[in-house]
């Protein structure tokens, strides 16, 4: 296999990883939207009944705090985040890599894409932490209000 082939394969692998990473982010945001809907449904069905039920006001307050936490964590995941890079602009390539042999361009592109992947991954990992927090908050919200209604 020529060295051009190895560089091209490396570039294609790096590009594929970046595309998969973008799909992962899209899926995370879709699941977060669903979780946000679930939180609102729990609040509308259980929150109102918990407020109307006598006694144990602290459970109601904690339920609303969990609801607020779920909203905040979900909003963080859904909000746009600077620094996420999933594409390259052709003009930049033309400007930076003019008169460079194609195998070397593929090699450099592979390294650029890997750098973008690593940089994106830091942000995506923080988004997953927020998603897990939102999930825990929705569960806490439901359990606190159900407990209030059961007592």
Image (spheres, helix red, strand yellow):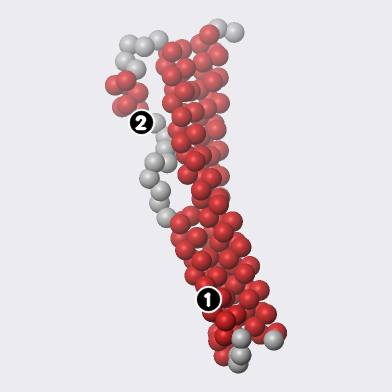
Question: How packed is label 1: few (under 14 Cα within 10 Å), some, or many (20 or more)?
Answer: many
The spot of residue 40 in percent (x, y) is: 53, 72
- In terms of depth relative to the viewer, which is nearer, 17 or 60? 60
Q: Which mark is residue 22?
A: none
Is residue 119 or residue 24 the one in the foreground? 119
Q: Which residue is at a point 51% across and 45% down the rendered structure image?
A: 124
Is residue 34 in sight in this rendering? Answer: no
Q: Mark 2 points at which residue?
A: 89
Check the image and name the residue furthest to the right: 150
Quadrant where the C terminus sits is bottom right
Q: Do the residues labelled 1 and 2 touch (CB within 8 Å)?
A: no
Looking at the rendered structure, the number of numbered marks drawn on it comes to 2
Residue pictured at 70% horizontal, 84% vertical: 150
Q: In this view, does 107 lie above or below 61?
A: above
Q: How far apart are marks 1 and 2 (CA)?
A: 46 Å
Element under disc 2: loop
| Picture residue at 43% right of the left edge, 13% below the top | 104
Residue receiving disc 1: 64
N-terminal of the pair, mark 1 or mark 2, is 1
Q: Which of marks 1 and 2 is in front?
A: 1
Residue 55 pos. (x, y %): 61, 90
SS for dot 1:
helix
Say which residue appears at 51% left-offset and 66% top-offset: 69
């Amino acid at each position: 296999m020529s060295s051009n082939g190895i560089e091209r394969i490396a570039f294609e692998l790096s590009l594929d990883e970046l595309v998969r990473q973008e799909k992962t982010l899209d899926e995370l945001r879709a699941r977060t939207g669903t979780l946000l809907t679930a939180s609102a449904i729990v609040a509308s069905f259980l929150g109102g009944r918990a407020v109307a039920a006598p006694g144990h006001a602290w459970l109601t307050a904690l339920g609303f705090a969990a609801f607020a936490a779920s909203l905040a964590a979900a909003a963080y995941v859904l909000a746009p985040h600077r620094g996420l890079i999933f594409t390259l602009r052709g003009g930049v390539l033309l400007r930076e890599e003019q008169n460079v042999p194609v195998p070397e361009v593929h090699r450099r592109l592979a390294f650029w894409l890997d750098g973008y992947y690593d940089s994106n991954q830091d942000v995506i990992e923080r988004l997953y932490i927020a998603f897990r927090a939102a999930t825990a908050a929705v569960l806490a919200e439901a359990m606190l209000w159900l407990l209030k209604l059961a007592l």
